[in-house]
């Protein structure tokens, strides 16, 4: 694999800056959809006009009955320009910068960041920028294999290509699928954690054969170990994928005592806290470190973080705690432009969900969804049909989902 | 001079030496592994409370957590089902005079180096006695294997697809030590007093079963047994006074003639 030219290690690393982040509350509708990888614009319930930018009322008929609706994003590039000057701290460090006007097939004309390969027909997407806010990017109509390498586009995505990644648990089938997917995406280096190194695990030899992989003893329940691993590599890690998870299938009355629940909290919640305290500062310092900067922190959560699944009740609670902490991490990483990606799978097809009937998301599909989310710049990932359906039900009526899960 | 004064004087002069038989309590020291669906003992973990900083300006201290069976530790009879109904079977109720006793050290280091599944037999013990004399009642019998010199946790735990491979006593050896030598307990350098494959013996885990069933004790994860003479050492092994505790990490010391 061709690697990028290395940075001169004695040069100063520039500090992270952010593009303009202020948005009105209504404009955050665009961000909420972009976080899920959706392109939604306001559409008037009365006259069907699609509008942009977001407003409190329909710009055509003044109705306030506006719905966020998914739009196709197809459009025509009307005009383009290249910025060679900006007073904004973020953009002046990234000049020249391509912008254009796109007439969308669904109606409005939008100002968009332009991919360098665009021609007349374009496809626009709402993407999160380094400030975590939605902006509109215009991409070539047809996907090309090196499309993701565009310098401007990489400011919006967290593409693992050329980046150095830590996968916190390589012992699980998901961890191993993640490593393979990241290697296939041309990650430059992949550190793979494995707890209790005296227990050799299935897949160990195969992992070691992947040229980018370095196995590191890492136990997220051991503060000293996390601190030492971070001291060694945190200054180089561009993407953390925290898939370390402790999962047993018990509710409150299914298991005596608190030890299993405590072990779940220790890995799923305190593990994230330990990693965030030790890896967070170094990653924040490298949020603008060139074309392969620190960009993302991925948390393997669960759809049960949104609503408790009583048969796996204590696990659900630990994931809800981790979700809350991940929101804190997101707020603390955002000033450095490092994106926190939360992944909410339905049941994973592993031994701890043995007794749950299909559909279950496979390790390979979940790994693909996680790497896809990094490449597309998505912040909240609901991989697979089960998670998508539960998300829809939860958004529609959280109380109904609570009742359905406890039935 | 009375005996205790003489002991103190000889300790001070180095005529009696103190050997530390204890592994350092540290997070990276291996812990007992059970199937993952079972309840698990906590490994040793340590979190800083403050270190002369804003959390406590002039002092340094930690919180630590671990299971009763972590690091170098003591097994009380109540640990095993065979000892559950005995009197004085827990860390708080064992008479304290039992925490000090003579030690007989059986050197199995060559056998263990050749065969990680080495089982100590009654014959080994009888051969030892031919050279070193009969094992005295109420003594510790310590099985030296040099397992503690395996500093790599992978080597120390020694797992393969069929589980753990570490040395220990066989069924007859344990029965002999309990019934015919009336020992205080049995100590090893590996993670258990029983061999790694002792689940396949009959009964499973014979050292736990018979020792604890007869009110005797266990010591495991010992180190520095190579510094002890075959006979003549006195071991001090007092567990923490945990109410109804099944065991405890502890500092194990041996006194030997300088």
Image (cartoon, coloured by chain):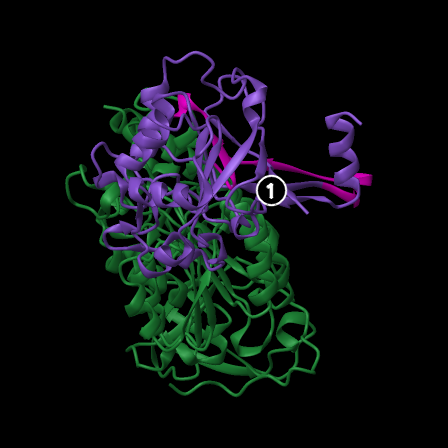
Chain colours: A green, B purple
In the rendered view, does A31 fall on the left or right side of A282? left
Question: Percent x, y for residue B98?
Answer: 54, 23
User: As rendered, which of B67 and A370 lies closer to the eye?
Assistant: B67
In the rendered view, does A271 fall on the left or right side of A95? left
Is residue B60 a member of the stretch shown in magenta? yes
Q: Quadrant of the N terminus of chain B?
A: top right
Question: Percent x, y for residue A119?
Answer: 36, 84
| Label 1 neighbour load within 10 Å: few <14, some 14-19, many 20+ | some
Badge 1 element: strand
Judged from this view, the residue extending furthest toward the right is B58
User: As rendered, which of B106 and B207 lies closer to the eye?
Assistant: B106
Report if residue A39 is visible in the image.
Answer: no
- The mark tally for this picture is 1
Q: Which residues are magenta?
A: B50-79
Question: Percent x, y for residue A224?
Answer: 59, 51
Is residue A391 a member of the stretch shown in magenta? no
Res B135 → quadrant: top left
Q: Is residue B177 above or below residue B153?
A: above
Q: Residue at x 51, y 42 (%)?
A: B71
Q: Which residue is mark 1?
A: B46
Q: Residue at x 48, y 71 (%)?
A: A164
Q: Is residue A157 above or below residue B170?
A: below
Report if residue B79 is visible in the image.
Answer: yes
Query: Which chain is indicated by disc 1?
Result: B
Question: Percent x, y for residue A99?
Answer: 50, 77
In the rendered view, does B258 fall on the left or right side of A141? right
Res A167 → quadrant: bottom left
User: As rendered, which of A349 and B17 lies closer to the eye?
Assistant: B17
In the rendered view, does B29 fall on the left or right side of B9? left
């Amino acid at each position: 694999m061709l690697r990028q030219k290395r940075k001169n290690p004695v040069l100063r690393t520039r500090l992270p800056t952010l593009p303009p982040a202020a948005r009105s509350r209504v404009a955050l509708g665009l961000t909420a959809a972009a976080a899920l990888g959706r392109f939604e614009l306001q559409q008037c319930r009365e006259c069907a006009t699609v509008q942009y930018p977001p407003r409190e009322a329909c710009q055509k008929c003044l109705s306030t009955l506006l719905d966020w609706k998914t739009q196709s994003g197809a459009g025509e590039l009307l005009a383009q320009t290249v910025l060679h000057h900006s007073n904004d701290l973020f953009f002046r460090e990234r000049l020249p910068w391509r912008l254009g006007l796109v007439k969308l097939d669904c109606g409005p004309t939008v100002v968009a960041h332009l991919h360098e390969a665009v021609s007349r027909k374009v496809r626009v997407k709402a993407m999160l920028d380094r400030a975590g806010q939605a902006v509109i990017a215009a991409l070539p109509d047809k996907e090309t294999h090196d499309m993701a390498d565009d310098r401007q586009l990489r400011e919006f995505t967290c593409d693992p290509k050329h980046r150095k990644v830590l996968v916190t648990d390589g012992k699980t089938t998901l961890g191993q699928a993640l490593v393979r997917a990241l290697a296939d995406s041309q990650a430059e280096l992949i550190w793979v954690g494995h707890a209790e190194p005296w227990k050799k695990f299935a897949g160990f030899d195969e992992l070691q054969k992947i040229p980018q992989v370095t196995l590191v003893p890492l136990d997220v329940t051991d503060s000293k170990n996390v601190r030492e691993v971070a001291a060694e590599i945190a200054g180089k890690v561009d993407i953390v994928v925290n898939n370390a998870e402790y999962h047993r299938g018990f509710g409150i009355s299914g298991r005596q005592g608190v030890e299993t629940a405590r072990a779940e909290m220790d890995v799923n919640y305190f593990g994230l806290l330990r990693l965030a305290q030790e890896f967070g500062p170094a990653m924040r310092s490298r949020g603008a470190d060139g074309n392969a900067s620190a960009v993302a922190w991925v948390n393997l959560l669960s759809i049960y973080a949104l609503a408790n699944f009583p048969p796996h009740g204590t696990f659900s609670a630990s994931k809800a705690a981790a979700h809350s902490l991940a929101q804190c991490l997101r707020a603390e990483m955002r000033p450095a432009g490092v994106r926190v990606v939360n992944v909410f799978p339905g049941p994973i097809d592993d031994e701890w969900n043995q007794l749950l009937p299909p559909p279950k998301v496979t390790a390979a599909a979940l790994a693909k969804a996680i790497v896809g989310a990094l490449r597309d710049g998505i912040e909240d990932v609901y991989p697979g049909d089960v998670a998508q359906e539960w998300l829809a039900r939860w958004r529609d009526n959280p109380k109904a989902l609570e009742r359905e899960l406890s039935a | 001079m009375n005996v205790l004064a003489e002991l103190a004087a000889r300790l001070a002069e180095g005529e009696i030496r103190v050997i530390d038989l204890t592994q350092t309590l540290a997070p990276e020291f291996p812990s007992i592994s059970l199937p993952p669906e079972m309840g698990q003992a906590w490994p040793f973990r340590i979190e800083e409370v403050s270190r002369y900083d804003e959390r406590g300006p002039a002092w340094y201290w930690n919180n630590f957590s671990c299971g009763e069976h972590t690091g170098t530790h003591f097994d009380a009879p109540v640990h095993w089902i065979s000892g559950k109904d005995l009197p004085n079977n827990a860390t708080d109720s064992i008479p304290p005079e039992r925490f000090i006793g003579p030690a007989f050290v059986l050197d199995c280091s060559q056998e263990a180096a050749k065969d990680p599944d080495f089982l100590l037999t009654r014959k080994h013990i009888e051969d030892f006695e031919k050279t070193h004399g009969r094992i005295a009642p109420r003594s510790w019998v310590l099985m030296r294997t040099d397992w503690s010199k395996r500093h790599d946790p992978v080597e120390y735990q020694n797992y393969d697809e069929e589980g753990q491979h570490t040395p220990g006593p066989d069924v007859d050896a344990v029965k002999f030590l309990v019934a015919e030598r009336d020992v205080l307990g049995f100590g090893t350098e590996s993670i258990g007093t029983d061999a790694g494959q002792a689940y396949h013996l009959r009964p499973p885990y014979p050292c736990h079963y018979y020792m604890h069933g007869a009110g005797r004790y266990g010591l495991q994860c010992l180190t520095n047994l190579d510094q002890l003479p075959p006979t003549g050492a006195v071991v001090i092994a007092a567990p923490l006074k945990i109410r109804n505790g099944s065991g405890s990490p502890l500092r194990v010391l041996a006194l030997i003639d300088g």
